[in-house]
Amino acid sequence: MYEKDSMDFLDETDRQILSMLKSNSRTALKTIGEQVHLTAQAVSNRIIRLQKLQVIRRYTIDINEEKMGAATIAYITVFMKTREHQQLRRFLQAEDIVKEVHRISGDGCYLVKVICPGMMEINRLLDQLMEYGTYRLNLSTERIKG
């Protein structure tokens, strides 16, 4: 029923709906409908279609980590010294302070985003990362966008 291998299935209205949901996934269907000139039911049908097509994978929230006591944001580039990639992945997935992990090309093997209260937690993580390889640490000093 749905064509997955073509980007033609997304029209401008779908893109507007996605943009609004990305900005605030709790936006009322009626509000979205008013912006894209559809009924709330038509918007709902499009969202269901986009979910079935796996264009929309999940809904989430954007937490202000600073208000939650986590004011330190770090980006760690991991340089593997072993072939234990699956063990590293399992370790990083289990760590609460690790918010994102990307396998990368170029300089390093993985890019890890960490958000936590302070350097004590980062140092603990870095000590454990030494089992898998070396690292380069970059600390965020100011959020410009996002």
Image: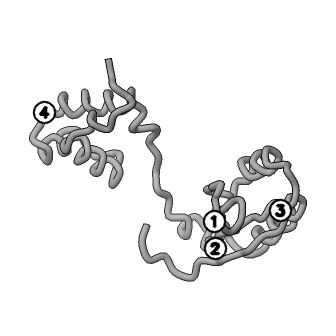
Between disc 3 and disc 1, whose residue precedes? Answer: 1
Residue identified by numbered label 3: 129
Q: Which mark is residue 55?
A: none
**Mark 4: secondary structure:** loop
Between disc 2 and disc 3, whose residue precedes? Answer: 2
- Mark 1, other Cα within 10 Å: few <14 / some 14–19 / many ≥20: many
Q: Which mark is residue 39?
A: 4
Q: Quadrant of residue 8?
A: top left
Q: Amino acid at mark 3?
A: Leu
Q: Is residue 52 above or below residue 13?
A: above
**Mark 1: secondary structure:** strand
Between disc 2 and disc 1, whose residue precedes? Answer: 2
Quote the CA–CA distance across marks 2 and 3.
Answer: 18 Å
- Mark 4, other Cα within 10 Å: few <14 / some 14–19 / many ≥20: some
Q: Amino acid at mark 4?
A: Thr
Does the CB distance between marks 2 and 1 fall below 8 Å?
Answer: yes
Q: Nearer the viewer, mark 2 or mark 3?
A: 3
Quote the CA–CA distance across marks 3 and 1.
Answer: 16 Å
Residue identified by numbered label 1: 115
Between disc 2 and disc 4, whose residue precedes? Answer: 4
Between disc 4 and disc 3, whose residue precedes? Answer: 4
Q: Amino acid at mark 2?
A: Thr
Residue identified by numbered label 2: 72
- Mark 2, other Cα within 10 Å: few <14 / some 14–19 / many ≥20: some
Q: Does 43 sit left or right of 37 as displayed?
A: right
